Image (cartoon, helix red, strand yellow):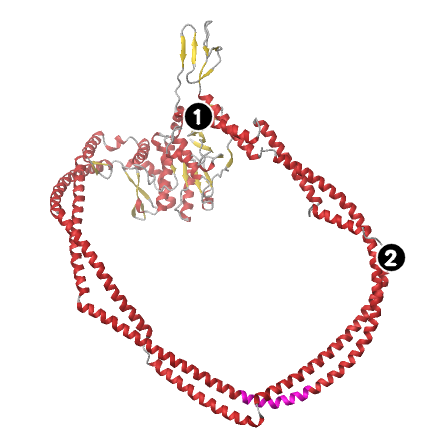
Amino acid sequence: MRIRGLTLENVRKFAGRRVSFGGVGDGITVICEANEFGKSTFFDAIQAVAFEKYTSKGKLVGSLRPRAGGGVRIVLEIEVEGGRYAVEKRFLAKAGASVTDLARGVVIARDGEAEDWIARQVGAADQGPAGLLWVRQGVLGLEPADAKPAERERLTEARRDLLSSVAGEIEKVTGGRTMDRILRRCEDDLGLLATGSRLSPRGAWKESVESEKALAAELEVLERQCAELADALRERRATEAELGRIDDPEERLRRESDLNAAREAARAAESHAQKIAAARGERDLAAMQAAEALRRRDGLAEALKRVGETAEEVERADADAREARARLDTARGAETEVRGLLAEAEAAARALRAERTLAERADRVGRAREEAERLAAVLEQVRGHRAEAAAAKARVAGNPVTAEALSALEEAAREVARLRGATAAAAVKVTPVYSGTARVSLEGQALEAGVPVALEDGSELELPGIGCLRFDLPQGAEAEDAETRFAEALAAEDEALERCGVGTLAEARARAQTRQQDIGAAELADGLGRSLAPDGIERLEQALAAARAVTAEAAEGPVRPVEEISRDLEKAETREAELRGRLGAASEAVGAAREKVASAEAALAGARDRREAAEALAGEEDTRQGRLAALAAAAERAEIAARAADRAHAELTAGAPDAATAAANLKRAEASHENARRRREHLLERRADLSARIDTRAEEGVEERRNEVADRLTAARARAARMEAEVAALVRLREALTAARDGAREAYFEPVQEELRPLLRILHEDAGIDWETDSIMPNALRRGGETEEFETLSGGTQEQIAILTRLAFARLFARRGQHLPIILDDALVYSDDDRIVKMFTALNRVAMDQQIIVFSCRQMAFAGLGGDRPRMRMEEAG
């Protein structure tokens, strides 16, 4: 069997859609898409078609249903012995199965027969072959890690059956059935006492073990209660001892003394800190007084120096001011002359400008008249388009059949039609066939021959000459539910028709089309109006009013042409500009002279102010030197006083206690005193609680009960030990018998070893596999002269060996005549870059005569695998 294509409809994330791929070749086919695309969904869909009955509602089938609900449809296209077949299964809703011969277009099997046909092609007995060759995502070994015991047994039997069919019947290898009978008898005896591969107790051994466990649990509880009693006694003694230490008079006196000493030290530190603060204030005041004395001395000396300098500065400023005033008088005369000439030129230019204004007004009135005519025509068109748009919008507002309302109505109509068809399909029908003249009647109406009639619950057929035949049809929950849904669907359809204001679906569709046409007409009219009046009709009306206002201006008689007036005005303005330039230069000269006068006078005033200020600071001339000497002596005395205050502050600071340390020590002493008080209260409460618990346990007599249960436990353990010894003896016997049989099984694994050796050499040149005879699974890897247990290998190596083993099994199936595809879902996830390339080589080696399908999300990593890459097709489900 070879897979050629797959189609999924309404499966998981593909709700309401159909996704498919085809063109799967004989070698490697790689379906490589990003995460969340649905690759594992394809794998599960193939599993469901191969192994799940179409009537199944199990975990796998339930997981295929999308969140939106509905039925699941899967079509698997396969090739068997040269023929192409489409295997289709529908799950959950309208469940069914079919097999279609694609060459002839004929369904060759349905439902149960289809299930049998599928099972023959995929070797589905106990899910054997495909369970070996189809690797689900996350499976490292030959079996899923969470496989149940029954599933593990099925897969083991499939591997054993495969090896037996290739290497020969196991009876020929083990030496006869006598050994098997002895082993079975040993297994039966062992089965009376133990079960499972872990030899879990059963029967009498289980009863002994359970009795031992119950007594041990009871003893553990009693031991714990005794321990709790002893602990409580010890803790009460410790509590009382600690209370004695806390209440000891010497300890209490020590705590009080420590607290009082800490408080005294804190008060002393605070007092000394206040003295330091007062000394610091005196030091700062003396420093400020010394600074002020120095400032006054230096200020008087600087003022005496400035008196001489400012007198010379006043004489120089007075001479500069007289020279600046003379230059200002000359500049003002020249400015007055130019200003008169400019006034004459400005009067001539004003007359020409007035004349040109009259000429321009006449031209503007003419242009405004033409603009008013154009705007009036445009305004008329805009108003017409706005009226058309308003009418279309009014029709739209009066038409309730929107696209959403029509869609809801169509959905309701489809649901009514679907439920009506389902109800009709489920109805009981009778078809009369007459041989004489008598006719069967229903409600007084004779039934026509050959015409089927649907019957309802309680229908009565009148049989002439016989009587009546009453039909009491069973109405199951599903039928009642179908009627309810049909009634609800009819009500929903009527409600949708009422919302649309129509009587039929066709009328609603016509009104919806009309509404859409009106919407288009409104949008077209609005668009034309906006194109003619992009700024709005109000702006257009304002522009028309403005143009008409301009046309109302009347000309004041004939005027010269604008061009002639402009030439005369240009000459007048040239003369005016020339004179204005000369006036500007003259004004600038006057301004410059005025600025120099102002600057010279300001300099003179400033010099006089500075001289007066210097003299004011210096004071009376005959007292200046005496005052300077007095200020120098005062400054010296202030500096001496400041140095003395600084030394006093330094002496206090040097001998000061650490206020922060004293505060911290006080806080510690207070906390210690408070903690002792709280601890005493807690210990008193704890002692009362322990005393109550001790009294309770003493009344229960737990120690006597513990001794009694201990004696019973000793006896139970002896019984369990005897049965455990018997189980061990049976196990040793079984192992000895099995070892004798296993010696003859080396040839049993040779076929799979033969297929596996060349594949292993691709990864490890000298590697080999040891097999576990019972589970028929790889047990250890031999390489480099060492043997490594399979469970101790890295995840990547386990995964690689498991896949190579599956490839070997696939070749054994082919040797037996069963050609089944290998399917890998996100395999090789733990392989490094070097190993994954080697695994790609192994896959391509086997794919020369074996179909392999690989699902992966690792697009870059699997680019080197090669193979065909079919294209996914997705569309809405019909």
User: Seen in the image, is 196 located left or right of residue 79?
Assistant: left
**Residue bearing mark 1:** 482
Q: In this view, does 248 lie above or below 163?
A: below
Is residue 321 located in the magenta-colored stretch of the structure? no
- The quarter in which the N terminus is drawn is top left
Q: Which of 403 and 649 is in front in this view?
A: 649
Q: Disc 2 designates what residue?
A: 561
Q: Where is residue 379 in the image (x, y as percent from the top left)?
A: 73, 43
The residue that appears at 81% across and 71% down in the rendered structure is 579
Drawn side of residue 723 relative to residue 625, left or right: left
Q: Name the main secondary structure of what is drawn in magenta.
A: helix
Q: Tell whether 184 sits left or right of 651.
A: left
Span of residues in magenta:
299-317
Q: What residue type is labelled 1?
A: Ala
Mark 1 surroundings: few (<14), some (14-19) or many (≥20) residues within 10 A: some
Q: Which picture quadrant has residue 742?
A: top left
Q: How crowded is mark 2: few (under 14 residues within 10 Å), some or many (20 or more)?
A: few
Alpha carbons under labels 1 and 2: distance apart: 97 Å
